[in-house]
Amino acid sequence: MSRKLQGEMGIYQELGLQDVIVATGNFTELGGSLMPGEVLEAMRDAARSFVSIPALHERAGQVIADLTGAEAGYVTSGAAAGLVLAVAACMTGSNLAAIQQLPDTDGLKNEVVIHKAHSNHYNRMFLLAGAKVKEVGYGAHRTLPWQLESALDEKTAAIVYVVAQFLVTQTALPLPEVLRIARSKGVPVIVDAANELPPVENLRKFIDMGADLVIFSGGKDLQGPQPSGFICGRGDLIAACALNGAPNHGIGRPMKVGKEEIVGLVAALKRYVSLDHEARIAKWEQNISLIVDELADIERLRVSRVFPDYTGRPVPRAWLTWDEESAGLPKQAVVDALAKGSPIIRVLEEYAGKGLLIDPTTLLDGQEAIIAERLRAIFAGRGGALQSVEPGKQDRKA
């Protein structure tokens, strides 16, 4: 994939904006991911002619099924749209009258059960489909099997199980136990695994465990189009997802995926399973080692490597902590200095309740050195340097 040369004007500069060094991992707010050349070329080729969208969806679903081990697959306009369609499918099945009835769920199974420990702002996606949310458990403290069992009744459409870094997953029931309880009650389980790549094995893991539907984002580590994602799972439920989705006039009509995004997602998925993932991790380790080594001699700053991340993904990260009061340097001041400087640098603002995290998965070549040099300048207390730090021009000692 081609990159701009140093000092070269790009489209964002023409619009009066700056590029951003993203040390957070893939976030929608920061543009998701950067698509490699083969994905861009596939999308460019798809844009050159017309095609039957239902037929393209069906063929793309076959590729998804082959690569995930599921019965079927369906491309969505992001993982959030996948949640809407998955829940809708569990409420309506392939009943066309029920599909046309949504978001009115009167007379339908319309409750989505979710652990309180998993409850988050994406619950709104269930509401968008017309479902009601039923939380189980004691929140961040504990969830007991009987709480889930007693929550499942004739109104239950599905259980949604979330695997995500920002949730207190350790207090929820383990997924195998959730699947066992769900099977005994005849309730489908939807796994929200939007950001659970890497490892590549997760593409099959949740299906192999017995999940009915699994949702992934296309615009994160897959490096597909940002407005893309996919659902894989049971054939009957995937068929219901398609009936609820565009180009049909169901609840998912506004969530249509263009031919370019469908083809781009397929290209990204094929590429992803063929990558040398060990080499990717080795590159991330190299970047994190450089940052840790470059900042190790700053007395008031503690820098360490964190591995794996919150949910066990094989991603090394650099964790920065310091005594904000004695250093006279609030965390927000560091975040602001990074974000308001040139180039803009964005980092994760918390880990275990304090400090900053640097995630290497979205860094381009050489950006790890820029981050290290900017941080050295900030902790050296050079006011002017907080706003603009050019690599190679800083003192080497804090």
Image (tube, rainbow, N blue to C red):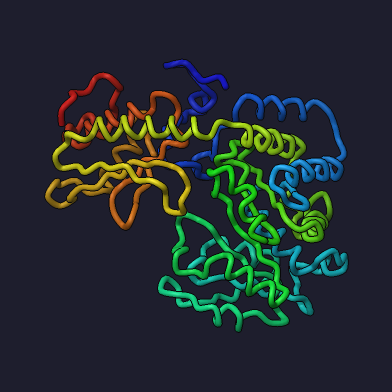
* Residue at point 25%, 30% (across, down): 294
224 lies above or below 169: above
Side (left or right) of 299 relative to 390? left
Residue furthest to the left in view is 326
**Camera-side residue of 256 and 149:** 149
* Residue at point 35%, 38% (across, down): 339
| Image quadrant occupied by the C terminus | top left
Please identify the quarter of the rendering in which residue 109 is found: bottom right
Side (left or right) of 176 relative to 171? right
Please identify the quarter of the rendering in which residue 108 is found: bottom right
Residue 359 image offset from top left, x and y in percent: 40, 40
* Residue at point 58%, 78% (across, down): 148
Residue 356 image offset from top left, x and y in percent: 31, 46
| Image quadrant occupied by the N terminus | top right
**Camera-side residue of 205 and 389:** 205
71 lies above or below 160: above
Residue 63 image offset from top left, x and y in percent: 76, 41
Count of marks, rendered view? 0
Residue 380 image offset from top left, x and y in percent: 16, 34
- Residue 250 seen: no
- Residue 358 seen: yes
Side (left or right) of 278 relative to 37? left
Please identify the quarter of the rendering in which residue 139 is found: bottom left
8 lies above or below 337: above
* Residue at point 87%, 39% (across, down): 52
